[in-house]
Image (cartoon, coloured by chain):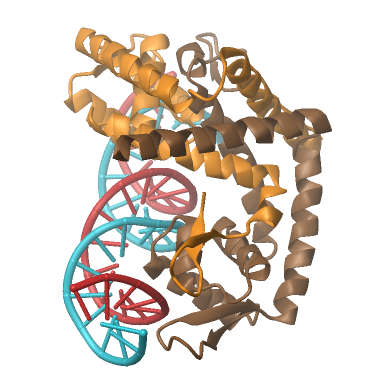
Chain colours: A brown, B orange, C red, D cyan
Amino acid sequence: MVRKRNKANTETIPVNDKTLRGLVGYNMKRSYITIQTDMLKVLGEFGLRLTAFSALVLIVDNPDMTQSQLAAALSIERSGVVLLVDDLENRDLISRNKVPGDRRTYALRATLAGMQFRDRVIAKVQAHEDRLFHKLTDDQKATLVELLNLVEQGNDAVSSSRKR
Amino acid sequence: MVRKRNKANTETIPVNDKTLRGLVGYNMKRSYITIQTDMLKVLGEFGLRLTAFSALVLIVDNPDMTQSQLAAALSIERSGVVLLVDDLENRDLISRNKVPGDRRTYALRATLAGMQFRDRVIAKVQAHEDRLFHKLTDDQKATLVELLNLVEQGNDAVSSSRKR
DNA sequence: TATTGTTATACTCTATAACTATA
DNA sequence: TATAGTTATAGAGTATAACAATA
């Protein structure tokens, strides 16, 4: 809870954020920042940032995907993916592979070490989420994900309807 | 939905993000980015970023709060608040006021124009949220906020228990 | 002409650290 | 000594734009 000191400076009283709390987006931001901060700490032990972690997992699950596809999946620009993939490749977690049919693109694959590394990181992240969400039952967690996905999909619908 | 082109390049097939979807944090990030992007667009029409908007609303709701209190409420450093408050003050939305008892601090207050401006922005943001969350019933929205707050509070508990 | 990956560059946001004036 | 606000600086993360190679 956010707090401020009172005039006597002897105790803390909470800052009033009632108006902001009335906006769903504010509640999302606050809780997202909360878990992001903790996740960065966990991933930091592995020398990973959030995006690099996502990239590695996506490459493991989508062998031979291209950098452009990765950029789209991560919602970042291709130029940013270059640096990201450079780093993962330098650490021998993934490899850029020539594609016979198209000499412009690379097929990205995780190395064996990359897959094993991913497994270790995922296990740690999973364990951390269990702690982080200890106040929620499994049902509540499932409901939360369901509602978050509705928000995500709902916006897609709004966007595409606007384009018509 | 994130998609990639198949080999024939005639249609799009989705990128597999099943592993990441198994993590609550990933679902939160995706949906947060979704609404953040849209919110930035709405606030941009008013020349506001997310943090500046939050700051203005907090100052309206907490008259005479100090910059340090604002920094804590926004979870950013005091040095960042200076620039934030500079901007809002230059636009005559808020004012820095001398405090009789303590010459180090400023009491921040919204101007009349600031309060009216806030009302207009809030109305626009509220209307936008209604569109953004159109796939959710009021009950579902309430449940979402409730669960998000559990996540936020749950983490507080974890943090404080660690400090013991 | 369009696309992939690349490079160089710039911008936004925020943190860190040192400073001043007050307490 | 400690705190509020300020300033200067640096860093992370990302976008933009131009480019070469290839389709």
Residue ID at (58%, 56%)? A50
Q: Quadrant of the C terminus of chain A?
A: top left
Compare residues B112 and A82 and report the one nearer the observer: A82
Residue A61 sits above or below residue A142 on the image: below
- Toward which corner of the image does residue B60 lie, by quadrant? top left
Residue ID at (56%, 44%)? B29
* A97 relative position to B89: left or right: right
Residue ID at (70%, 75%)? A114
Instruction: Confirm whether residue A18 shows in the render.
Output: yes
Q: Quadrant of the N terminus of chain A?
A: top right
Q: Where residue A143 appears, x then y in whole percent?
A: 71, 29
Q: Where residue D20 appears, x then y in whole percent?
A: 25, 90
Instruction: Confirm whether residue A135 shows in the render.
Output: no
- Toward which corner of the image does residue B54 lie, by quadrant? top left
* C19 relative position to A127: left or right: left
Residue ID at (48%, 23%)? B134
Compare residues B78 and A147 and report the one nearer the observer: A147
Residue B87 sits above or below residue A51 on the image: above
Residue B12 sits above or below residue B47 on the image: below
Q: How many marks?
A: 0
Q: Where residue A108 appears, x then y in whole percent?
A: 57, 78
Q: Where residue D16 appears, x then y in whole percent?
A: 23, 59
Compare residues A9 and A85 and report the one nearer the observer: A85
Residue A156 sits above or below residue B132 on the image: below
